[in-house]
Amino acid sequence: MKLFKDYLYIHRKILLYGSLVVFIFLLTFWLYRLPLGAVLYPTALCVAVGVVFFAFDFFRFQKDRKSINEIKSVTDAMLSAIVQSPPKDHEDWAEAMRAVISAHDEFAMQTREKYSDMITYYTVWAHQIKTPIASMRLILSGEDSQLSRKASAELFRIEQYVDMVLAFLRLGSDTTDYVFSQHRLDEIVKQAVRKFRGEFIMRKLTLSLELSETVITTDEKWLSFIIEQVLSNALKYTKTGGITIKSTDDGKLTVSDTGIGILPQDLPRIFDNGYTGSNGRLDKSASGIGLYLCKRICKNLSHSISAVSQVGKGTSVTIDLSKSVPRD
């Protein structure tokens, strides 16, 4: 019914013109006082011919509309093939579509080139910046003072930000470097925690580890990145108390802190790209990228991540690795 209404609306001018012609035709016969049969017979004949014409035209319209709806799901290659051999009476439409496809292809090529250049530049930058970072760390390793420890902690944060850039670039690329194999979850966690030992000591925060010897199938490098990001966030917003890390035999890892917590209205959006929330407005260095990357990487690894929090009491982030626990 909707299709028929659309057809009538599109052809409204033709129908209006035809109705006007018939009216003039009937009016003329009536004014000349011609016999009724002489009026009705040609009128009925014209209506019959008009009905047949519009029936064929409507079926053609229905076929065209079906083809247009199918175009919504076709690929660029299929669309190009259609416009190269268009149906009859559609050459103008095909010419216009060829121009649109050509402009689209040119724009897509320029966009890919710009994106490729950007990826190349930032990848080179991220790798080059690691050289002076390594040099600075080597210099600081020869000193043991409050200032050097603080400088080492800040240098470690810089390394994390560089790793975030690389992770962001790799997530957007067509290729990945995921390598799945079996690992003990507690060993991956301990390796990540060691990188933060200086910050725990300097800020006098406690660390409690309650880890099971669960074996999981995952990419060690990318899972370590997730754990480090979660730990970094926990440390950033924890001023007193400490952090507890627990893992269960079914492959669930929970990082809990005694920090400032997250407002209820912010909690559902903490994994959104660029979202910093109320805590981010307090900490001007927050980018809202870390947890977003964790969510994306977890999805790629067939893991999941979630959080619960109470303002003033702390936050618990759980990484669910249960799908990666080998079954007997």
Image (cartoon, grey):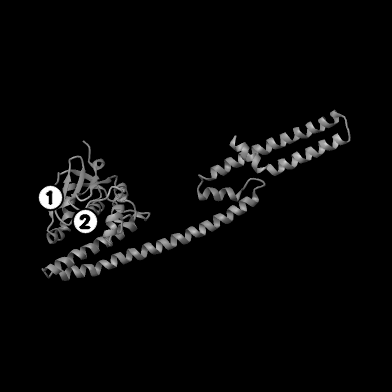
x%, y% of residue 185?
A: 18, 47
Residue 55 vs 135, above or below: the answer is: above
x%, y% of residue 255?
A: 19, 49
x%, y% of residue 116?
A: 40, 61
Q: Tell me which residue sits at (14%, 46%) in the image.
A: 211
Which of the 4 image quadrants contains residue 56? top right
Please state if 295 lies on the left or on the right of 56 as rendered: left
Q: Amino acid at mark 2?
A: Tyr
Q: CA separation, marks 2 and 1?
A: 17 Å
Q: Amino acid at mark 1?
A: Ser
Please state if 192 lies on the left or on the right of 91 as rendered: left
Residue 88 vs 164, above or below: the answer is: above
CA neighbours of label 1 inside 10 A, class few (<14), some (14 to 19), many (20+): few
Q: Secondary structure at mark 1?
A: strand
Q: Residue furthest top?
A: 37
Quadrant where the N terminus lies? top right
x%, y% of residue 180?
A: 26, 48
Q: Secondary structure at mark 2?
A: loop
State the mark number for residue 237: 2
Q: Which numbered disc flags the more N-terminal residue, 2 or 1?
A: 1
Q: Tell me which residue sits at (74%, 36%) in the image.
A: 50
Residue 53 vs 317, above or below: the answer is: above
Q: Nearer the viewer, residue 74 or 31?
A: 31
Quadrant where the C terminus lies? top left
CA neighbours of label 2 inside 10 A, class few (<14), some (14 to 19), many (20+): some
State the mark number for residue 208: 1
Q: Residue furthest left?
A: 144
Tally of numbered discs: 2
